[in-house]
Image (cartoon, grey):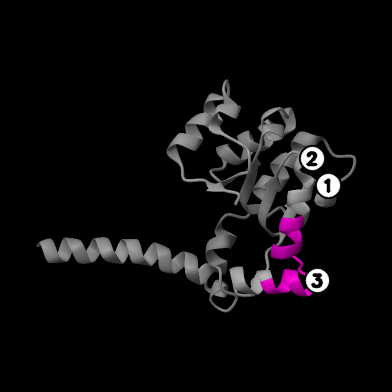
Amino acid sequence: IIFVLTAVLVVICVSERARVWLYHHQIFSKCFRSERNRNINNEGDNLYDAFVSYSEKDNLFVEKMVKILESPTTREEKQLNLEQLGGRRYKFCIHERDWAGGKKILDNITDSVKNSFRTIILLSKNFANSEWCQHEFDEAYKENKVIIVMLEGTTISDFDGNDIIQSHLRLVTYLKQE
């Protein structure tokens, strides 16, 4: 019985790691298309891997991230993409580039979250002070699509008074910028 329980536990742990590894490799990622399509709002014309939610004051980090993960052009960017992601490229929804003009901001936020597989929240002190960033977090949180990257110099205490973000940071694994 112990052997069977151990084997089941190992399969569960290994399968999640294997799944993440496979998803991030260009050849194997095609196997996950059906998973991605289950979470897409059929009304949207665009399909994004992720909506990137950030304060405009953190746009230099976003520009660098997009260059490497979405559209590497220089030799250095292509090399980083190849080393880190095996050459896989992502399609992001970036508000400055992809939002519809003349549309209500809250509607753009809702559409961006619904038309994206995940929402990457780039937490920073600037994010903590932005009402629009809070709306983006709330919408992604409601849809259970949140991936948090805590930017350099940011701590959980920067979100004192925001119980939802603090609770999320305490209960869910998040990434830290290195």
Tell me, yes or no, whether the two marked residues, 2 and 1, touch with CB atoms within 8 Å: yes
Q: Is residue 45 visible?
A: no
Query: Is residue 24 toward the left or the right of residue 7 in the image?
Result: right
Q: Which residue is the site of mark 1?
A: 96
Q: Which residue is the site of mark 2?
A: 56
Q: How many neighbours does mark 1 have within 10 angstroms: few (below 14), some (14-19), or many (20 or more)?
A: few
Residue 21 in the image: x percent, y percent?
A: 48, 69
Label 2 residue SS:
helix
Residue occupying image coordinates x 72% and y 27%: 131
Q: Earlier in the sequence, mark 3 or mark 2?
A: 2
Residue 116 in the image: x percent, y percent?
A: 65, 53
Q: Amino acid at mark 1?
A: Glu
Q: CA distance from mark 1 to mark 3?
A: 20 Å
Residue occupying image coordinates x 55% and y 27%: 157
Q: Which residue is the site of mark 3?
A: 73
Residue range corresponding to the magenta coloring: 64-79
Q: CA distance from mark 3 to mark 2?
A: 23 Å
Q: CA distance from mark 2 to mark 1?
A: 9 Å
Residue 76 among those drawn in magenta:
yes
Q: Which disc number belongs to residue 156?
A: none
